[in-house]
Image: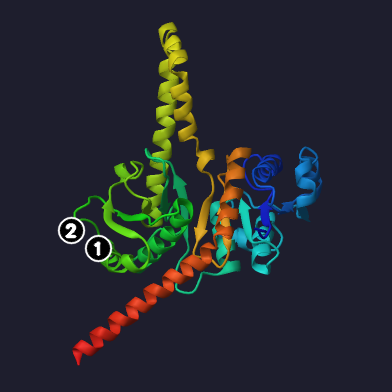
């Protein structure tokens, strides 16, 4: 299948042009049908492309030397949406010059630019940031929102669940298990908005091709018992950073333990295959590529510190969402939900008469 090309903000990320181009080239080695619009400083992009002959016939360069700073506040960045590499990459999706945009730049600025240029889909009040995380089982877990919205009401949470489930079906190829993040699994726990969202999801899930399993606590997110975890951006961002911090803590703790003595070093050599497997499983580059769900277009956020393999994963995520038409899936599910709500409203009106 021929995919629309992917716009890459070549100037974003901690390492800049070299890693972004290396990542795009690695993605194309995995999937030789990928085509790219590379946005950024033309001279630097051409220098980086010299190392990747496989990219020459697959890439067009859109010159731009203005870059959104990592600490730039979104409102400031928005004023330069038409001159920065990030803004031009997103605008390429709006204009139809690319099917998706990938950037490793400032998350807040990318969300603001994407929302302004692409707008939210009909039936979606707010877009959400979703990411994939590893679990103890073979399948990964999707979590949203991770920071796009500090607050979310019941209606928002239901929409997040629908978007996350549609994304999960693309990854898993089966009906996902959806849960709301809460402080307990009992029905009485949590805020009213959580209980209201749970009630609607329980009723709507059978017609929307996902299974709603109630609540999940934060210590169960990575156990493999849930496929989609839904929450507001404030709680989601805290949970995500706690998980990432714990992963780094465990990795550093093992490194310190294995280098503390000669006996420990020998033990490390014996257990090295297991520790390498653990390192691979916890490496964020292997799950890189957060998605802004709910927009009229695909925008993927790569981690700022991602290496080439991580950028390649983010590009692959963008292509996968295009190939499986994520926006159409979400639109169809929203239409089903609206029809269900209309039927319930009609039934209530008839009963009142």
The image quadrant of residue 93 is bottom right
**Relative height, residue 290 to residue 258 (above, below):** below
Query: What residue did someone put label 2 on?
Result: 188
Q: Position of residue 220 (x, y in %)?
A: 30, 43
Q: Position of residue 235 (x, y in %)?
A: 36, 52
Task: Rate crowding at label 2 as few (under 14), some (14 to 19) or many (20 or more) other CA atoms within 10 Å.
Answer: few
Q: Secondary structure at mark 2?
A: loop
User: Does residue 297 appear left or right of residue 230 in this picture?
Assistant: right
The CA distance from mark 1 to mark 2 is 8 Å
Residue at left offset 55%, top offset 44%:
303
| Closer to us: 176 or 197 | 176
User: Does residue 14 appear left or right of residue 147 in this picture?
Assistant: right
Furthest toward the bottom, the residue is 353
Query: What residue did someone put label 1 on?
Result: 195
Whether residue 326 is visible, yes or no, is: yes
The label on residue 328 is none
Whether residue 307 is visible, yes or no, is: no
Residue at left offset 25%, top offset 88%:
349
Q: Position of residue 106 (x, y in %)?
A: 58, 51
How many marks the image carries: the answer is 2
Q: Position of residue 305 (x, y in %)?
A: 57, 39
Task: Rate crowding at label 1 as few (under 14), some (14 to 19) or many (20 or more) other CA atoms within 10 Å.
Answer: some
**Relative height, residue 139 to residue 114 (above, below):** above
Furthest toward the top, the residue is 262
**Quarter of the rendering occupied by the N terminus:** bottom right
| Closer to us: 126 or 273 | 273
Q: Secondary structure at mark 1?
A: helix
**Quarter of the rendering occupied by the C terminus:** bottom left
Circles 1 and 2: CB atoms closer than 8 Å: yes
Circle nearer the N terminus (1, 2): 2
């Amino acid at each position: 299948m021929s995919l629309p090309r992917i716009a890459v903000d070549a100037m974003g990320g901690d390492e800049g042009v070299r890693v972004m181009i290396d990542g795009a080239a690695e993605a194309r080695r995995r999937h030789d049908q990928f085509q790219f619009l590379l946005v950024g400083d033309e001279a630097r992009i051409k220098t980086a492309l010299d190392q990747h002959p496989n990219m020459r016939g697959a890439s067009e360069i859109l010159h731009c030397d203005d870059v959104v700073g990592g600490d730039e506040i979104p409102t400031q960045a928005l004023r330069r949406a038409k001159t920065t590499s990030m803004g031009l990459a997103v605008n390429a999706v709006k204009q139809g010059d690319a099917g998706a945009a990938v950037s490793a730049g400032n998350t807040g600025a990318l969300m603001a630019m994407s929302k302004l240029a692409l707008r939210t889909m009909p039936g979606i009040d707010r877009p959400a940031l979703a990411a994939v995380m590893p679990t103890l089982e073979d399948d990964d877990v999707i979590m949203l929102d991770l920071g796009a919205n500090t607050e979310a009401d019941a209606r928002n949470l239901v929409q997040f669940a629908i978007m996350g489930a549609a994304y999960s079906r693309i990854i898993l190829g089966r009906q996902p298990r959806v849960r709301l993040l809460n402080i307990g699994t009992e029905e009485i726990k949590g805020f009213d908005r959580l209980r209201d969202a749970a009630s609607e999801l329980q009723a709507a899930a059978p017609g929307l091709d996902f299974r709603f399993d109630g609540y999940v606590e934060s210590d169960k997110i990575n156990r493999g018992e849930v496929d989609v975890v839904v929450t507001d951006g404030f709680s989601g961002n805290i949970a995500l950073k706690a998980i990432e911090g714990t992963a780094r803590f465990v990795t550093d703790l093992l490194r310190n333990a294995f280098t503390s003595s000669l006996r420990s070093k020998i033990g490390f050599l014996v257990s090295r295959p297991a520790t390498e497997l653990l390192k691979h499983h916890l490496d964020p580059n292997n799950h890189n590529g957060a998605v802004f769900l709910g927009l009229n277009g695909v925008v993927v956020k790569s981690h700022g510190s991602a290496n080439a393999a991580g950028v390649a994963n983010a590009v692959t995520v963008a292509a996968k969402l295009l190939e499986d038409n994520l926006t159409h899936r979400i639109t169809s599910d929203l239409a089903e939900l609206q029809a269900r709500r209309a039927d319930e409203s009609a039934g209530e009106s008839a009963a009142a008469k």
